[in-house]
Image (cartoon, rainbow, N blue to C red):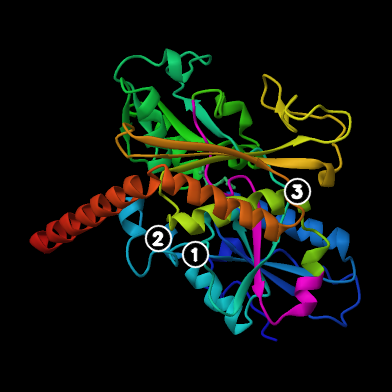
Amino acid sequence: MASATATDLGAPAQNAPQAADTSTSTQFPHVNIGTRNSALAQIQARAVAAALKQAHPERTYNICPVVVEGDRDKITPLQQLSQGENAKSLWTGELESMLEKGDLDIIVHCLKDMPTQLPDKLQLGAILEREDPRDALIISPRLPKDTTLATLPQGATIGTSSVRRAAQLRRLFPHLQYADLRGNVGTRLAKLDKEDSHYSAIILAAAGLKRMGLENRISQYLSGSVGGMLHAVGQGALGIEVRKNDQPMQDLLDKIQCERTTRACSAERALLRALEGGCSVPIGIETSWRGGKGLAVGAQPARDYDKHGNAVEEPEPDLEDQELVVKTLVVSVDGKEAVEHEAVRKVRSAEEAEEMGREVAKILIEKGADKILAKINVEKQWAAKKQLEELQAAS
Ligand SMILES: NCc1[nH]cc(CCC(=O)O)c1CC(=O)O
């Protein structure tokens, strides 16, 4: 097996792999863990390495940060980058070809960024326990810290490059403006904070901020009930990609997966797959577990949050006694049309959860979601064509 080094992975020198642990047996080769090289991605990769180390202390782990295409092009708006044939490979393509070649053994992804269709030889080997899946509002330091979506001044600009976020917000906050905002979490915060920034606030995933120790920047946690914002499919969870024929590696991953998150995210991903939405399509979702011993069905969501956004710890009912609640929304880019649906079902496996996701997709389509999505695809193609013409005119 190839043992990759920082240099032959094309990573900058300061991103050298973490020193491999040589204190234990060397009868196994290192597990090479691929990751994007952003600060958040590397934090996530280290968390996975730590979980693996705990489950399998006999193995050694090597983190390999790689600069990917999506991180290089900072100019083209995301919706247009994710067009056409290259659509899905932008964030994952380079890492995946290294995995296929054997230069990597696993890739750690934000599940949200993982395409619903993976290359033939690869599979989603594990989904780990979910962090807070909600979106969060971050306010400019020039505004009062307790500013919320509802108290932002008329005409204030919110930075987000997510069609899903902007479309949902336009629906409930038509008096605000929405502008593209690109870059890693640190870059986006810097663009908000700089003195002449034209953003009054930005929306980021709470999970990324929490993982980076930046949750103190969060002014408001958004959800279906606060700000009417449903999160992206897979948001807050980590997905690990592995070669299909690598059973030993799959066995390692089986010990660190989270069944609750796997079932919920399997439903979410099956729904997205059935609607054929790319990562920037305005599909919002919220999954939760309901019922179980000691709780009346529908009495309260399985996970609640206090006013600081911390998960309120309650003794967790047995997963097998609970039902999965899937709440979902497809909204037009202008926020004027929306189709929503909520379903509740017992799912005893990831496969049953996928079935539920497909059922919900079918109902959304019956309610008219396909028309909203078709219109978005036409608009995207038009925008991409216009941009190409501009580029040609400029050259
Ligand atoms: N769109 C990029 C992206 N992909 C994953 C995360 C972090 C949150 C997660 O793990 O789902 C982010 C940043 C963000 O949306 O704020």
Q: Quadrant of the C terminus?
A: bottom left
- Mark 1 in CB contact with mark 2 (< 8 angstroms): yes
- Residue 388 lies, in percent from the top left, at 18, 61
Q: Amino acid at mark 1?
A: Val
Q: Is 99 drawn above or below residue 128 in the view shown?
A: below
**Disc 3 or 1, which lies upstream in sequence?**
1
Q: Which residues are magenta?
A: 228-251
Query: What secondary structure is found at the residue carrying circle 3?
Result: helix
Dot 1, crowdedness within 10 Å: few (<14), some or many (≥20)?
Answer: some
Q: Is residue 261 visible?
A: yes
**Disc 2 or 3, which lies upstream in sequence?**
2
Dot 2, crowdedness within 10 Å: few (<14), some or many (≥20)?
Answer: few
Q: Amino acid at mark 3?
A: Arg
Q: Amino acid at mark 2?
A: Arg
Q: Is mark 1 within 8 Å of ligand 1?
A: no
**Disc 1 or 2, which lies upstream in sequence?**
1
- Residue 297 lies, in percent from the top left, at 77, 30
Q: Report which residue position mark 3 lands on.
A: 260
Outermost residue, front side: 366
Q: Report which residue position mark 2 lands on.
A: 72
Q: Report which residue position mark 1 lands on.
A: 67
Label of residue 121 in the image: none
Which dot, 2 or 3, sits closer to the camera?
3
